[in-house]
Amino acid sequence: MQTLDRIDAVRRLVAGRRRDGVSVALVPTMGNLHEGHLSLVRVARSRAGCVIASVFVNPLQFGPGEDFDRYPRSFARDCELLAAEGVEVVFAPTVAEMYPAGPAQQTLVEVPAFSGMLEGQRRPGHFAGVATVVTKLFNIVAPDAAVFGEKDFQQLAVIRRLVRDLCLPIDIIGAPIVRDPDGLALSSRNQYLSPAERRLAPGLHQALDAARRRVEAGDRSWAAIEAEACAVLEAVGFEPDYVAVRRALDLLPPDGADAAADLVVLGAARLGRTRLIDNLRAG
């Protein structure tokens, strides 16, 4: 496995693989890898002969007061895990390589259709940071396919819309959420949880599952479903940001004509200093 930190080096390698007729898949990550990330790599390997994983903690997607400085970094271990999964190249650029004029002067990519709701409303500027770094990675690697986890459901919607609107010839693949046995969705931020908080953390999944079951049973009282899920979270120690029943296609609020199979229940809540997100598809 090669580890590259220069854009021009990645482009030369990809050009060589293209001359050999090898397809390329990209798995963008911020490092501190866990089984969820590795599941994305396995999907990528099933779709392409050359898998490139990026490891880059992107400052543009962190807002003021968020955890950019303390975001967990474990690059040596990440490389060991990626090599064991058959990744051909790790692209690990510096901030200066990705943003030579500095993050504050970087041209931004906006996806307004999805960026002002839910996560975007709670984290202003977050999705501009995501869309910008992903667009740059797509331009650097020019992959045939790119794999993203469905845990970040809104992020996946942003990227799919970005690719469609900018006419990028890239197949965007969503990979299923990987969970611990008690239902907690795997996340690099889970390691922030204290032992007591970790015991409570599956409550987010449980609250969303209860909401999903109401939707699947035909309950269309969306606001009541959302409010009850938030109340359940508060009762067990969470500070909920939101629970929302939305249409999976466009993340807009559903109406009475939407079938349960077309809906997703999304939630975000804080447990101590840790912010957790999760989602469950209905149907």
Image (cartoon, helix red, strand yellow):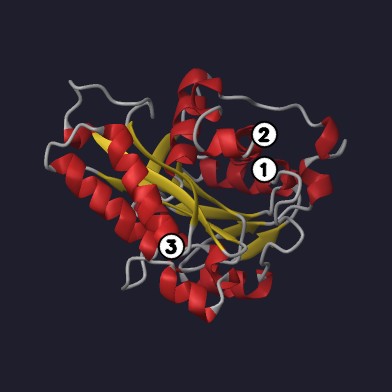
- Viewer-nearest residue: 43 or 58: 58
Where does residue 234 sit, x and y in percent of width and height?
A: 44, 57
Identify the residue at horizontal 62%, vertical 24% (top origin): 110
Tell me the CA gap for discs 3 and 2.
25 Å
Question: Residue 61 — which label?
Answer: 1
For marks 3 and 2, give the one nearer the viewer. 2
Q: Quadrant of residue 57?
A: bottom right
Q: Are marks 2 and 1 in contact (CB under 8 Å)?
A: yes
- Viewer-nearest residue: 149 or 86: 149
- Is residue 248 shown left or right of residue 79? left
Which amino acid type corresponds to the residue marked 3 in the rendered image?
A: Gly
Where does residue 95 sit, x and y in percent of width and height?
A: 79, 49
Which amino acid type corresponds to the residue marked 1 in the rendered image?
A: Gln
Where does residue 152 sit, x and y in percent of width and height?
A: 46, 47
Which amino acid type corresponds to the residue marked 2 in the rendered image?
A: Gly
Tell me the CA gap for discs 2 and 1.
7 Å
Q: Specify the quadrant that holds the N terminus.
A: bottom right
SS under mark 1: helix
Where does residue 3 sit, x and y in percent of width and height?
A: 67, 62
Question: Residue 282 — which label?
Answer: none
Give the vertical position of 104 relative to 277 (above or below).
above
Identify the residue at horizontal 47%, vertical 66% (top origin): 86
Question: Residue 125 — which label?
Answer: 2
Label located before the other in sequence (3 or 2):
3
